[in-house]
Image: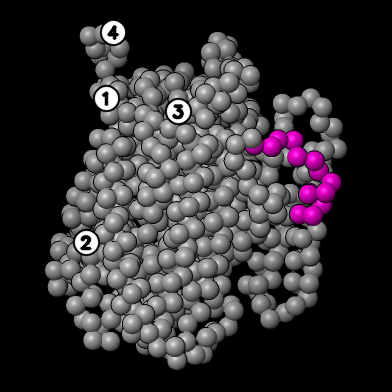
Amino acid sequence: MASGDGERSYWRWSKEDFFPEPSFRSWTAYGEALSHTRLRLRNRLLYRSTDAAELLALPRRSEHELRRCLNWWDLAWLGFGAVVGTGIFVLTGQEARFSAGPAIPLAYAAAGASALLSSLIYAEFASDVPSAGGSFSYLRIELGEFVAYLAAANILLEAIVGAAGLARSWTSYFATLLGRDPDALRIHAPALAAGFDLLDPIAVVVLIACSTVAMFGTRGTSILNWLTSLLSVAVIGFIIAAGFTHADASNLAPFFPMGAKGVLQAAAVVYWAYTGFDMVATMAEETRNPARDIPLGLVGSMSAITIVYCVMALVLVMMQRYDQLDPNAAYAVAFEAVGMRWAKYLVALGALKGMTTGLLVGALGQGRYTTQIARAHMIPPYFALVHPRTGTPVYATILVTLSSAIIALFSSLDVLASVSSISTLFIFALVALALLVRRYYDRESPQQPRAHLAKLTFFLTAIVGSSVAVSTCWNTNPDGWIGFAVTVPLWFLSTLGLALLVPQQRTPKLWRVPLMPWLPSLSIATNVFLMGSLGYEAYVRFGICTAAMLAYYVLVGVHATYDVAQEETSSNGDEIAPGFCRYVLIQLR
């Protein structure tokens, strides 16, 4: 359908919109495509995108631009809204009671340091490649399309399931605020299996409401987020001030009841409380000055959140002994123990608000992430379309919202709680690796000798391998010193060798990660270390999900991207000169 000015209507729904590639025009064509799967896989496995493709060619497939309307203030509050949700209220008591004891602030500091390292890396990438795809675009450029697809599919799946869990938690906290049982507002369906028999229509309504706000405009959503985030600041300020007035330093003894291993196990779990900041990087296309605003907003918000989390954790374990903390409602019970029973309602209100802004910012970030994946034709390009009036990816937002809503309606929190941060840690480690590749290897430079690539590959392999070895030693024999005496120096020497023997090929002119290559290498090591602290079930789930994603890629994704690449090669429509790309980047910055 065409509109009056000759443009196609945004509200359209045809097979051509979903599957425009030649491989899907008929069953015969699809069968022919499947017969060439091996050849096409080889082609796509070797493909790496470019800055020009991610910044100029792919956005054209959305037909309309995302609107540049955000500054560093908006991004800082979006980071705050995305990160500060239920994690600090739920995980602190649980991990202080069973893992870290009074040393829980150190667990938050360790997890925060790892998250801050990742935020520094994301800030450099987002200022250099201000794309809505975030980590998907960064990995597609530096590590290739296949790695980018696996990373994107995992983090998008976890984001969808995480949003469903957050919406279910919203219903539980709302019921608590009303003075009722957490399941009182759910509908029991005895015909369904256990774990899926408590229907939650309120969670569905909350998800749809937050996504509707996000679809109507990015600027309005940002203003609403930072205004409502003032409530979170007030609640956190109350918890810290009132908590310290009832603090008892004697509750900090013994400080390490479960030892250093307990602290690091807790750090792997509470890392979930920091997740969400990477969604800020997906707002790069809508940021007026991404080279300046994203580092300020992203690093600034993560630094402040780390300090706030550590102080809130310290307040809790000083108010009440760690072995008396309630693992499910630690702050509410702690205030009740000191005679402030009414404070539990204020804590519930703060958590409720945090979950709401978490869903709101999540709808923004997930929609942009999905948009870039659709622009690359890894999912139907229909979901890449940007609405001409709102300047937002309406179809992509609807896709992730409906997916989360279906899960939230049926799945209990016990089922959703099995989703851990393994995918997030995996992506963060890959992005750090991608930054090292970006800094030390320039594929467009004809002057790089083959030995340069060989040395880079050797040292990167040694950094990753030694990081895995350190994590394995810690989780198999934390009291042994021989393994650490070998693996830790190996990591250090690998990073030192990269710094001294492999010259950097690219230096960002606007914003850069300091202490290269030490900080990205440390980010790889810490993320791999925290991954190793997660349970066996997390890896089983990760493996099953990855296998399903590989099946989709072989049956659909590889054929769609191959067709698009062939069309572009024949028409040269998306081949944009690197010099022109640099010119456009200068204009954007």
Magenta range is 495-508
Q: Is residue 168 above or below residue 380?
A: below
Q: What element carries label 2?
A: helix
Rendered residue at 82%/52% (across/down): 497
**Nearer-the-camera pick, 338 or 48:** 338
Location of residue 511 in the rendering, given as x and y in whole percent from the top left corner: 59, 41
Q: What element carries label 4?
A: loop
**Nearer-the-camera pick, 347 or 182:** 347
Of labels 1 and 3, the one closer to you: 1
For label 2, the residue is 171
Q: Is residue 325 left or right of residue 256?
A: left
Q: How many numbered badges does the structure rendering display?
A: 4
- Residue 324 visible to the viewer: yes
Of labels 4 and 1, the one closer to you: 1
Disc 3: CA contacts within 10 A as few (<14), some (14-19) or many (>=20): many
For label 3, the residue is 375
Q: What element carries label 3?
A: helix
Of labels 1 and 2, the one closer to you: 1
Q: Is residue 203 above or below residue 143?
A: below
